[in-house]
Image: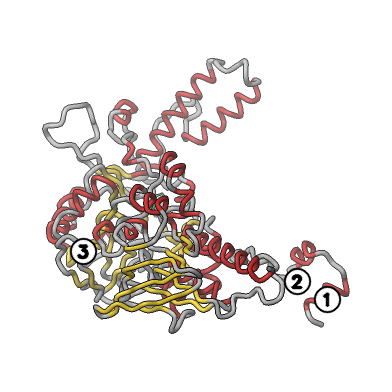
């Protein structure tokens, strides 16, 4: 009996079959396609796709399933775009006089130079990983054992009492939770909220605060083992109950400097960074590599586009191959190039699209991978994955969420944005390395003794990119975004910049779906006529 026969025979509802595990739920990546009549498939219709990043390759993959004849033009020698894993042998030379870098990381060591984490609610991304056979592992973004470091120059004025020392995130968080819970509990004890809450409600709220802040029976915060034990005084065998560390004072905390926004990108609060986060085993480029495999013979590499033209019935694209122009015509074009790349493209694009290309800003952002001969952050500091944060130019240190307890390791020595990324990204690579080591050594004194080699990148200087991702505000969303959502005659736009999931692979995937649906619906209309 086939599944369909079974369903027919029992006339059980889809929902109850689902509940019994008799059918698979509809795939999260199922396209919302119109039920076109006969002859409405894409068979033989030529589509030229600009860019072999996730948006371009997914578009080609899905259109291919519908019979379209897709060609993907990719300027680089690799696929993936901003999904790029740096490992031994990776080469890059940045724009504006960048020096050529060749990565010399050891075997099995890498970092994700672009996309590096997948939130559990990015179901379309996860669905593609499933469909493409990409294995996932946990990405640890939120680590209470990592550090905060408020750097203050000696001549700075102000009252920061916790400057120039490293503080475990767990110490700061638990102390602040403790004191705020204590203050609130006190005010509740004084019946300040009597009018809104009943006596029982208040008792429950105080119970909550007692647990939230780990307050003592008098509802006072006197420290907690949640913030950790003193060095060499962890709980142990026999007569070792453990010696809890002392809390910081509330005034000290308030003056610590940790209320600066730069420390606030905290994993347990932000929707995109809440656990569970995931990453592909072996590097994020497992995703583009798997997509590339589905597109054998359809991607032309080293083929930067130089002209994008409208013709009477479609599009004409000129690209450069080994320095010579090659022309390609098709019925549709799907342009996934980052907007800054459209600025210099000779094209027949409409004025509104050109204005979007001119005025939608892209973020400046950079990373450096540092290889160390010893995983001292694990061995000495007990940090396994997660992120330390500082107001220095390095901004964030990311500890690898894979290869725990191994011999060597690569950590991300900086991940910065906007002016910090601009300042660091404008330095020659040797200077960036020096900066990452000097600033990082304030948090990890082991740096100089253990460092081996580095590879850095500034996304705004990486060829064919133009920046990390599109950064819209209300005004640019209103003024420029709508132009990218409509086809410009036969040219469609896809990529994270055409979504509300900017800066995420999920944006690329979902934009590809949107475009495939739009093209296929249009073709359906043609064939109905
Ligand atoms: N997706 C990017 C990252 O995970 C950029 C980003 C950071 C987006 C933080 C939202 C919040 O680093």
Q: CA distance from mark 2 to mark 3?
A: 54 Å
Q: CA distance from mark 2 to mark 1?
A: 9 Å
Badge nearest the viewer, 2 or 3: 3
| Circle 1 crowding by C-alpha within 10 Å: few under 14, some 14–19, many from 20 | few
How far from the left and from the top, in percent, is residue 5?
A: 83, 78
Color theme of the render: secondary structure
Q: Secondary structure at mark 3?
A: loop
First reached walking from the N terminus: tag 3 or tag 1:
1
Q: Secondary structure at mark 2?
A: loop
Q: Which residue is mark 2?
A: 22
Ligand 1 within 8 Å of disc 1? The answer is no
Left or right: 297 in relation to 367:
right
- Label 2–label 1 contact, CB within 8 A: yes
Q: Which residue is mark 3?
A: 94
Residue placed most toward the observer, 520 or 122: 520
**Which image quarter is the C terminus in?**
bottom right
Q: Which residue is mark 1?
A: 6
| Circle 3 crowding by C-alpha within 10 Å: few under 14, some 14–19, many from 20 | some
First reached walking from the N terminus: tag 2 or tag 1:
1
* Vertical side of 15 occupied by 269: above or below: above
Q: CA distance from mark 3 to mark 1?
A: 60 Å
Residue found 60% across the figure and 24% down from its top: 202
Instruction: Name the mark on residue 373.
Output: none
**Which image quarter is the N terminus in?**
bottom right
Residue found 37% across the figure and 45% down from its top: 228
Residue found 79% across the figure and 63% down from its top: 16
């Amino acid at each position: 009996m086939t599944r369909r026969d079974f369903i027919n025979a029992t006339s059980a509802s889809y929902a109850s079959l689902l509940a019994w595990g008799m059918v698979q739920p509809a795939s999260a990546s199922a396209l919302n396609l119109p039920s076109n009549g006969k002859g409405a498939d894409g068979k033989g219709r030529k589509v030229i796709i600009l860019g072999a990043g996730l948006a371009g390759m997914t578009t080609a993959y899905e259109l291919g399933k519908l019979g379209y004849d897709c060609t993907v033009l990719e300027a680089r020698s690799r696929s993936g775009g901003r999904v790029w894993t740096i490992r031994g042998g990776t080469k890059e030379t940045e724009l504006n006089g960048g020096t050529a870098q060749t990565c010399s990381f050891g075997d099995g060591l890498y970092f994700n130079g672009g996309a590096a984490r997948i939130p559990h609610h990015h179901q379309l991304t996860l669905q593609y990983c499933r469909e493409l056979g990409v294995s996932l592992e946990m990405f640890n973004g939120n680590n209470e054992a990592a550090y905060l470091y408020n750097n203050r120059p000696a001549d700075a004025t102000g009252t920061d009492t916790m400057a120039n020392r490293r503080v475990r995130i767990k110490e700061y968080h638990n102390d602040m939770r403790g004191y705020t819970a204590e203050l609130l509990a006190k005010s509740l004890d004084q019946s300040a909220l009597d009018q809104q809450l009943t006596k029982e409600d208040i008792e429950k709220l105080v119970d909550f605060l007692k647990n939230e802040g780990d307050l003592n029976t008098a509802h006072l915060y006197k420290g907690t083992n949640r913030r950790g034990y003193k060095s060499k005084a962890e709980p142990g065998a026999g007569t070792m109950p453990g010696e809890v560390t002392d809390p910081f004072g509330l005034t000290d905390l308030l003056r610590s400097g940790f209320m600066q926004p730069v420390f606030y990108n905290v994993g347990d609060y932000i929707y995109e960074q809440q656990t569970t986060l995931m990453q592909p085993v072996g590097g994020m480029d497992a995703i583009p590599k798997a997509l590339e495999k589905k597109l054998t013979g359809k991607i032309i590499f080293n083929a930067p586009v130089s002209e994008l033209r409208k013709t009477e019935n479609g599009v004409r694209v000129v690209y450069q191959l080994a320095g010579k122009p090659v022309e390609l015509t098709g019925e549709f074009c799907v342009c996934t190039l980052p907007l800054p790349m459209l600025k210099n493209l000779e094209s027949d694009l409409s004025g509104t699209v050109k204005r979007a290309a001119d005025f939608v800003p892209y973020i400046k952002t950079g990373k450096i991978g540092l290889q160390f001969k010893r995983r001292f952050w694990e061995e000495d500091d007990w940090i396994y994955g997660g992120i330390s944060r500082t107001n220095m130019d390095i901004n964030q240190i990311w500890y690898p969420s894979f290869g725990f307890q191994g011999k060597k390791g690569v950590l991300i020595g900086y991940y910065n944005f906007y002016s910090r990324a601009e300042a660091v990204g404008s330095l020659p690579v040797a200077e960036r390395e020096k900066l990452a080591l000097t600033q990082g050594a304030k948090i990890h004194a082991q740096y100089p003794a253990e460092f081996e080699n580095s590879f850095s990148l500034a996304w705004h200087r990486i060829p064919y990119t133009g920046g990390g991702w599109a950064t819209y505000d209300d005004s640019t969303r209103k003024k420029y975004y709508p132009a990218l959502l409509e086809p410009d005659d036969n040219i469609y736009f896809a990529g994270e910049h055409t979504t509300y999931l900017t800066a995420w692979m999920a944006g690329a995937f979902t934009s590809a779906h949107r475009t495939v649906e739009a093209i296929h619906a249009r073709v359906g209309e043609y064939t109905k006529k």
